[in-house]
Image (cartoon, rainbow, N blue to C red):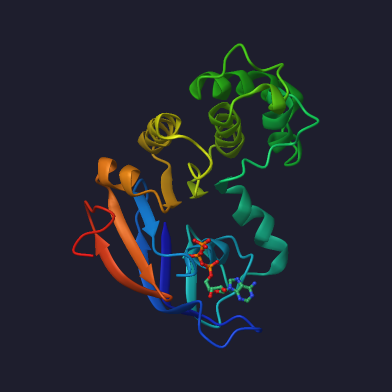
Amino acid sequence: MIRLEHVSKVYKTSTRPALQDVSVGVDKGEFVFLIGASGSGKSTFLRLLLREEVPSRGRVYVANFDVARMARRRVPRLRQSIGCVFQDFRLLNNKTVHENVAFALEVIGKPRNTIRKVVPEVLELVGLEGKSARMPHELSGGEQQRVAIARAFVNRPLMLLADEPTGNLDPDTSQDIMLLLERINRTGTTVLMATHDHSIVDSMRRRVVELDLGQVVRDDSRGVYGVGR
Ligand SMILES: Nc1ncnc2c1ncn2[C@@H]1O[C@H](COP(=O)(O)OP(=O)(O)OP(=O)(O)O)[C@@H](O)[C@H]1O
C-alpha cells in the first residue's frame, strides 16, 4: 500500500536532510504509528505520500501510484485515495457538520442523492448522529475531530493519514478517537498515524516506526513508545 525506497529529502533552505535513506513498506490494512521527536521527519514522510513534497532521492509508491514521478494532473486522484486528519481538525467553520462532510464529496463530483445517503451513514459510524445540523463551534474538540474523521473517511479512501490527531484532546477523548480509528482500520483501511502520545502508542501495541533525525531507527511490529530509551 505504501512503499518508500531509499528516500531522502533535503529542503532547499536546510542543510541537514529531513529524511535520509528511508525505506519502509506498509501493507494494506495495517495500522502503523510513526513516532519520533519534533523535527525527526514525520510530517515530511506524510507530505511525500500526498505529493505535497517530492523526494530529493528515492522512490515513493502509494497503491499503484509512483508518487514522485506521476504527472501532476494525476495528483488529485492520488489524494482522493488518501483521507487526512490533523491535530487542528481543519473544519469549515461556516458550514454545519453535515455540510462539512458533504463538501468532501461535492468537490469530487459525487451525485447529490449519493451524498444524501452516505453522509448520515458515516456520521453514524463516528457517533455523531443527531448532530448533523450543528456548527463546528457548537461541538467539543473530540466531536470536531470525529467530524474531521468522517470527512476523511466518507469517500472510503484506501488509507487514512493522521498527523497528531489527538494532540489537542484530553486523554479520555483521545482514547475514544483511537477506538474510532481502530474501527476504521477494521474496515480494511490502512491507517498511518504520526504521534507524540506515549500512552496511546503503549496501549494499542501496534506497529511502531520511529524516526530520529530523518532516519528509521526502529520498526517494531507490536511496539511501545519508548523501548530502551
Ligand atoms: N518546508 C520546509 N523547509 C525547510 N525545512 C523544513 C521544511 N519542513 C520541514 N523542514 C525541516 O525538516 C526537518 C523535519 O521536519 P518535519 O516537520 O518533517 O518533522 P516532524 O517530525 O513532523 O516534527 P513535528 O513533530 O514538530 O511536527 C526539520 O529539521 C524541519 O526544520
Query: Residue 29 location in percent, x, y?
Result: 36, 45
Q: Is 215 on the left-hand or right-hand side of 158?
A: left
Q: Quadrant of ligand 1?
A: bottom right
In this view, 170 is above or below 19 = above
Query: Residue 161 location in percent, x, y?
Result: 50, 50
- Name which residue lies at 75% across and 36% down: 92
The one nearer the camera, 22 or 145, is 145
- Name which residue lies at 39% across and 63% down: 36
Query: Residue 63 location in percent, x, y?
Result: 47, 57
Query: Residue 88 location in percent, x, y?
Result: 61, 44
Displayed quadrant of residue 174: top left
Q: Quadrant of the N terminus?
A: bottom left
The one nearer the camera, 19 or 16, is 16
The one nearer the camera, 222 or 57, is 222
The one nearer the camera, 99 or 89, is 89
Q: Quadrant of the C terminus?
A: bottom left
Which residue ends up furthest to the bottom in the rendered image? 15
